[in-house]
Amino acid sequence: MLRIDNLVKTFDGERRRRRALSSGAEERVFAVNDIGFKVEEGELFTLLGPSGCGKTTTLRSIAGLESPDSGTIEVGDRVFFSGAAGRKTVNVPANERGLGMVFQSYAIWPHMSVFDNVAFPLQVKKRRERPGKREIAERVMRVLETMELGSYADRQATKLSGGQQQRLALARALVMEPPLLLLDEPLSNLDAKLRESLRYELKRLQRELGITSVYVTHDQTEALVLSTSIAVMRSGKVVQLGRPREIYENPNCKFVAEFIGTSNFIAGNVVAKDGERYSVGTEDGQLLVDSAADLPVGADVIVSIRPEAVEVSTSSRAGAVPNEWTGTVLTRAFLGEAVDHVVKVGTHEIRARGNPSVSIEQGTSIYLRLDPSKLALVPVG
Ligand SMILES: Nc1ncnc2c1ncn2[C@@H]1O[C@H](COP(=O)(O)OP(=O)(O)OP(=O)(O)O)[C@@H](O)[C@H]1O
């Protein structure tokens, strides 16, 4: 449905502007630095990464609001952008791309009713593409009902709550039945509770309507909940691309492991390998790790251990289970649905998250069990 290849977008750098008079040195900021990905029909594809990594620039390039330096952008069988030095550039204007867009600031039209906000984009279509009055009313009401705003049709748009206004912005984008919906942090202006409930609502809607979407966020939980696929970005590059679970359970570098959720990291070295079972030597003992990564014996690695993959216990099962380490509880914290223990194991402090029924006092000597299939091997370098 959407295909991006070798996309590059640079901007003038600050320093270049400052130094231009004295040295004339060329300096460009690579906002997007040679990225490529494909989004299949019906997917919700998320660009996830920290501030400044190039997510918005990528989305704006798809929308036609930025003009890339080079690369190609295709939606269905239409080429929206194609360009490189010395080649003829194709660059379809934003208003001819027919894409739906929803941004952080929901920018509804305040002087209009809820109904008119959604009807307006259809009413201003070119005469030959404009649906008749009755069809407009039907489409508007259908999309308002889907967004659970049907009973607010006559209300002035500004008299809706924040969450309702954001749903209205979505309704306005959906009524155009775009082949592709672009969403740039659409939930970030809402309070935490509303954000969470709208997350699930968006997921339901996206699934029900099967609308292909590209979603930008820096919020990893949002990305994990909503997405069918995630591209994790860093400094203008895509560093990992995969299904949410894949990225969470098998991050391909320390940056991804750190950015997505909380992890314990233990540095080590591959000492033996038997199929997908690795034996990793660490400062505090050996760890068995199951991994599909292709790493040679001798490779420096980091074992990434999610807190929920660490089982704590006051009794030993040594011999019956692999990877049992001993340690002392440094702190514990009650989080409502879980209890966190921070455990000192040799040179490491390991965070464990488990059921609140297991709560062990500070200073207690305990056993940590690390299931090899729940550990991830992250290559170093
Ligand atoms: N118009 C511009 N002029 C100069 N530099 C720009 C411009 N727009 C973006 N940049 C730079 O390009 C890089 C990528 O910006 P972009 O907005 O795409 O990042 P982002 O990942 O969406 O960040 P955020 O989550 O903060 O919106 C940043 O270094 C940014 O400063």
Image: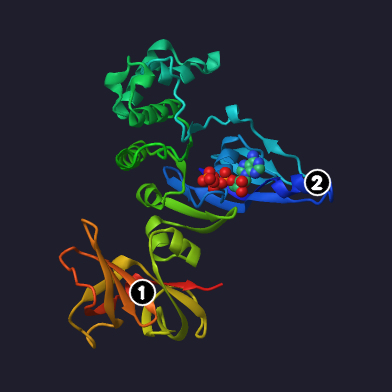
Amino acid type shown at disc 1? Glu
Mark 2 or mark 1, which is nearer the start of the sequence?
2
Seen from the viewer's position, the closer of residues 104 and 175 is 104
The answer to whether the residue bearing label 1 lies less than 8 angstroms from the nearest atom of ligand 1 is no
Residue at 42% across, 45% down? 44
Q: Is residue 221 left or right of residue 340?
A: right
Callout 1: helix, strand or loop? strand
Determine the quadrant in which ligand 1 lies: top right
Residue at 55% across, 40% down? 75
Seen from the viewer's position, the closer of residues 222 and 64 is 222
Q: Hey, which quadrant is residue 205 in on the image?
A: top left
Seen from the viewer's position, the closer of residues 129 and 18 is 18
Amino acid type shown at disc 2? Ala
* Label 2 CA crowd tier, 10 Å (few <14, some 14–19, many 20+): few
Residue 248 at x, y = what percent?
Answer: 39, 61
Residue picked out by circle 2: 20
